Image (cartoon, grey):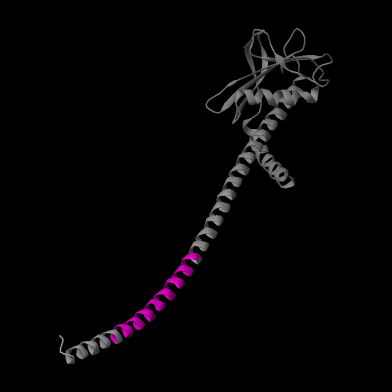
């Protein structure tokens, strides 16, 4: 577990410059079920919309936020979230994750301060906190991707280890086969030598029998037969 966490940490630190350069949230005007308003948007690679929504729900637990599906809409909404560095009042947070390319999601978040959506121009004091939230969420997404990659690689390692175990077992089987074959060869060689010995004995017996038959024929001839 410690090795896994160290690898994950190293991967995240490696990704930090990339996050700074490519995965910063951008401020946009975007439409959703509540109308149109200022929002912050992230382009997330390697995670689908459903995975991003689950991570967002997990992320908002740190703010005691509980996102739920909006009726007649595709967004999630966490109401009455307290973010003191953003607003003195509670904030309703709308979020929408949509498909982006073959392997990614476009994630848009609206911070409803009550009558106005958070923007850099109208809320210069609270906006930096929203951007930092989005940046932290982007980092969480990268961590999730690394964890998924690590699990995949660990699974592949287990498969390779299983392959090695199977090959080692096969090798032992082949070695046993060879040993059995060697034993059979030794037994066959011994049987051949015994057969040769028996053949020589049998040849002598045949010669003896032939000699006996020849003597019997001669005796018969002397007796006037043959």
Where is 158 relative to 16, above or below?
Answer: below
129 with respect to 168 (left or right): right
Q: Residue furthest bottom?
A: 222
**Observer-nearest of 72 and 112:** 72
Image position, residue 220 (x, y; %):
20, 88
Kindly identify the residue that appears in the image at 66 percent across and 14 percent down.
75
Whether the magenta-drawn stretch holds residue 196 is answered as yes
Image position, residue 80 (x, y; %):
80, 14
- Which stretch did the figure color magenta? 180-207
Whether the magenta-drawn stretch holds residue 158 is answered as no
Q: Magenta-highlighted stretch: main secondary structure?
A: helix
Kindly identify the residue that appears in the image at 77 percent across and 9 percent down.
114
Where is 15 relative to 54, above or below?
Answer: below
**Observer-nearest of 52 and 174:** 174
**Observer-nearest of 151 and 169:** 169
Image position, residue 152 (x, y; %):
61, 39
Q: How many marks?
A: 0
Image position, residue 189 (x, y; %):
42, 74
Where is 210 relative to 20, above or below?
Answer: below
The quarter holding residue 188 reads bottom left
Where is 216 relative to 171, above or below?
Answer: below
The answer, for residue 121, to whether it is visible in the render is: no
Kindly identify the residue that appears in the image at 73 percent across and 44 percent down.
1
96 with respect to 62 (left or right): left
**Observer-nearest of 52 and 168:** 168
Q: Residue furthest front?
A: 223
The answer, for residue 52, to whether it is visible in the render is: yes
Q: Quadrant of the C terminus?
A: bottom left
The quarter holding residue 196 reads bottom left
């Amino acid at each position: 577990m410690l090795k896994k966490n160290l690898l994950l940490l190293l991967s995240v630190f490696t990704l930090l410059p990339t996050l700074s350069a490519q995965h910063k949230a951008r401020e946009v005007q975007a439409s959703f079920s509540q109308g149109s308003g200022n929002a912050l948007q992230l382009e997330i690679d390697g995670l689908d919309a459903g995975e991003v929504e689950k991570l967002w729900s997990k992320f908002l637990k740190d703010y005691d936020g509980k996102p739920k599906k909006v009726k007649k809409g595709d967004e999630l909404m966490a109401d009455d979230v307290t973010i003191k560095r953003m607003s003195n009042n509670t904030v309703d947070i709308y979020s929408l994750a949509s498909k982006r390319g073959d392997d990614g999601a476009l994630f848009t978040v609206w911070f409803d301060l009550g009558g106005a959506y958070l923007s850099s121009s109208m809320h210069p004091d609270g906006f930096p906190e929203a951007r930092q939230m989005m940046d932290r969420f982007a980092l969480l997404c990268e961590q999730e991707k690394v964890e998924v990659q690590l699990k995949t690689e660990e699974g592949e390692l287990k498969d390779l280890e299983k392959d090695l175990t199977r090959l080692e077992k096969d090798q032992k089987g082949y070695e046993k086969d060879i040993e059995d074959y060697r034993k059979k060869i030794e037994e066959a060689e011994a049987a051949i030598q015994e057969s040769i010995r028996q053949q020589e004995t049998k040849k002598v017996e045949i010669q003896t029998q032939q000699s006996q038959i020849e003597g019997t024929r001669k005796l018969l001839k002397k007796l006037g037969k043959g």
